[in-house]
Image (cartoon, coloured by chain):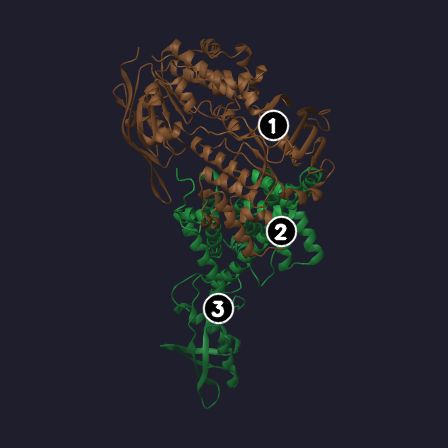
Chain colours: A green, B brown
Amino acid sequence: MTDTAITAPVVGRSLWGDAWARLKANKAAMFSLFYLIAMSVVCIVGPYFVPHQYTTIYADYVRTPPSFSAYPKPEMIETAMNDAVRRMRVDVKEWRQEDERVFITVTSAKPLDARNIRYLDRSDTFDNAKLESTSADGLSAVMSATIKQQYFFFGTDNTGRDLLSRTLMAGRISLAIGLLAGIVAVVIGVVYGATAGFMGGKTDEVMMRIVDVLYSLPFIFFVIMLVVFFGRNFVLMFLAVGAVLWLDMARIVRGQALSIRRQEYVQAAEALGVRSRGIVQRHVIPNLLGPVVIYMTLLVPQVIILESFLSFLGLGVQEPMTSWGVLISAGAKNIGTANWLLLFPAFFLVSTLFALNFIGDGLRDALDPKDR
Amino acid sequence: MAGETILSVKDLRVRFRTLDGAVEAVKGINLHVDAGETVAVVGESGSGKSQTMMAAMSLLASNGEATGAVDYRGKNLLTLGKSELNKVRGRKISMIFQEPMTSLDPLYTIGNQLMEPIRRHRGLDAKAARAEALRLLELVKIPDPERRLKSYPHEMSGGQRQRVMIAMALANDPDILIADEPTTALDVTIQAQILMLLAELQRKLGMAIVFITHDLGIVRRFADRVYVMRSGEVVEEGKADELFANPQHDYTKMLLAAEPTGRKAAPPDNAPILLDGRNVEVEFKIGGGFLAGPPMLLKAVDHISVALKRGQTIGIVGESGSGKSTLGRALLRLLPSEGSIHFGGQDLSKADKSEMRPLRRELQLVFQDPFGSLSPRMTVGQIITEGLLVHEPSLSGKERDARAVEALREVGLDPAARNRYPHEFSGGQRQRIAIARAMILKPKVVVLDEPTSALDRSVQKQIVELLRKLQADHDLSYLFISHDLAVVRAMSDYIIVMKQGKIVEEGPTEAIFGDPRETYTKTLMAAAIDETKFRQSA
């Protein structure tokens, strides 16, 4: 019997280490984890590399479908040119394209103003407009301009804004709300639930009845009240969503704390004379972190969906700022004419939620003590 | 009756895939069971004795696989399809488990659970199945079987539940009954009754019994042949009588000698009384509430007086539910109680939590379950120094670490263990850690609440020796709570026998063991120490 001989390495593997090893063996969860990290990085860094600002309106490119080739397409050049020329209040006599430049010969009943070429520059399609030559009578002129190459990989929306940059910006907002509101809910929920569960008795009763009362308030009503009183604002979203979702967390944590309180190691700590705070800190909270982590990964998608729902109803973030929910809501209205407005944001949202759920499932398997 | 071999296990290997690679739990064992005989498979925890039988019944966990052959009357059970297997499993070979609390489904009545397998396997109609169920309950001697058919498992005691499990196992008239530690979770007196019942049923029905146990006392009284297993291998086999009379392998000898030995001398008569409880009384409220009317009162501890001298060990003996643990906790003021408790002249009975806090370091407690009493998220070092954070807050981290090293050495553990986590240790090592946690504070009184009952015999012996050494070194007083009379006898110089919250008998150890006066004490002794056979060898 080797009861006293210990031959294993000096530094032990904690339960967290164990769980991590188990999680690493779970392919779906690990893939989801990398996907989620990649998604966050893309949403945070991506907007700096996309050539379009998420607020820039391209009047020439309203609702252009997504494409890997550059805009404008050949047939769009004439429309854009006619548009610009019409603003000059002159007529097109003829036009031709040489490589990157268009050459336009215009005529007018009145003498032409050289400043008219700025209408070409103002167009989203053209750039570097030049007045090549003016006829002697000043009634006709040749103008030239380069065609601006624009890429809209995800297409543009109803007002001509680039959907790619908008989707990434929306991702920032949705993920941030998911994470922050998730943290708000977890912090309130853990502290509240652990206190109720550990104190037990009358305190527990009163605290949990308060939770019950809050549960019975309709969520939407609560949010509308907040919006009415404080106006629409980003921080408010965190508070509203977090303030509602901590209720579930508090219940879960309370249940855990109740069972941990009856564990022998808590009794042992009591027998050592450890104060309640020390017990909650050293014994109760570390031991209920497992379920909390699991619940948090399942809470984040819930928050994102709630935010989307609020935005869908028009109670969420304000234009020109956007979130996946806002984009999907806009996309849903244009599903017949411009389905990409729905498809891209929906894909981003759904794949993120999938990834989060897979991670949550993986964590539950990895941390479930019954598995050990 | 004996003779024909009906079950033979050949070169059976069981391996489990784990994150740290494959673990071989059973390493190529051979054993056989003849018709009508009783075979015991003995070994300590982790020896692979249960996994052998689980593999034979194809009940391994999903990450386990078995190779080799398990032949039952010419069929290899390992290669049978599920439907083929079910013709044997539960019908010709049936099993009873250790935990009668969890093996029965709490949502169905006993009758339902008994009748289902009868109807499934034999195709009887409801009425015939009911009659059969009744017959089985009578067979296992459950009082008032007619009424019990309608009972739910939670309405029955552990012993009765185990009887029901046996009845279920017998329902299809099996050839072989595999009993996996069937009495371990039961009180000694109940244990004896169940074993007697099994012996009698075997005589009546003539099936073979495979008895898996760690308890050699049972084997000696019960088995014809014995296989001794250690770490997945059979180290010795033979006829029970021969094996006990003349063990060959060192491991078997060690197991046989593992009964805790030695006696504890009484402290000098003039030793001062450290902990003095008079007329201690603990009541629990059961039920009651706003609409449920007044709660029922249960007197868990009923007017008990205990006077613990310095250097003394008082053994408190009793079955589960006798209130012995409650008494121990009440004396440490971990439970509210009536009556007076004095510690070193100081009155504790009115002390509240904060007044008790400085005294906690002198009054320590060691728990039964070495798995539950250590927080799984803390390192061993953090666990054993937690008390120092409370009682010597001025110590620096380094000094605490030095104290941890000292405490671990004292309980016979490698101090390098303090950075590891409890789940990396065996049961005996964990119990040492729990003892180190109590000892680091240099207490005067330690309540030991069944500190050895979750451990293997050989480990028990080591823990008993450790506790005695610590007592001698530090002049400690123990309150030793246990249902295991052999351990109590080795540990204590004074014994209190409890039953239903009351003291039945008390006195010096030798007096109690030499001349037990009360019937209850006699029953306890007989159940624990008697060596007469339950059955004659076939």
Tell which of A29 and B283 is nearer to you: B283
In the image, taking residue B218 as reference, residue A184 lies left or right, namely: right
The amino acid sitting under disc 2 is Glu
Q: Residue at x 61, y 46 (%)?
A: A279
Tell which of B32 and A44 is nearer to you: B32
Q: Return the x and y of residue A18 as percentages of the image width and height.
A: 44, 47
In the image, taking residue B136 as reference, residue B12 lies left or right, namely: left
Q: Secondary structure at mark 3?
A: helix
Q: Secondary structure at mark 2?
A: loop
Q: Return the x and y of residue A330 as percentages of the image width and height.
A: 54, 56
Q: CA distance from mark 1 to mark 2?
A: 32 Å
Same subunit, labels 3 and 2: the answer reads: no
**Crowd tier of the residue under label 3, counting other residues whose Cα lies within 10 Å: few below 14, some 14–19, many 20 or above:** few
Q: Which residue is mark 3?
A: A48
Q: Closer to the observer: label 3 or label 2?
A: 2
- Rendered position, A193 above or below A128: above
Give the label on residue B324, or none.
Answer: 1
The amino acid sitting under disc 3 is Tyr
- Rendered position, B371 above or below B530: below
Residue at the farthest bottom position: A136
- Rendered position, A362 above or below B96: below
Q: CA distance from mark 3 to mark 2?
A: 57 Å
Asked whether the residues under the numbered discs 1 and 3 touch, taking CB atoms below 8 Å apart as contact, a structural biologist would say no
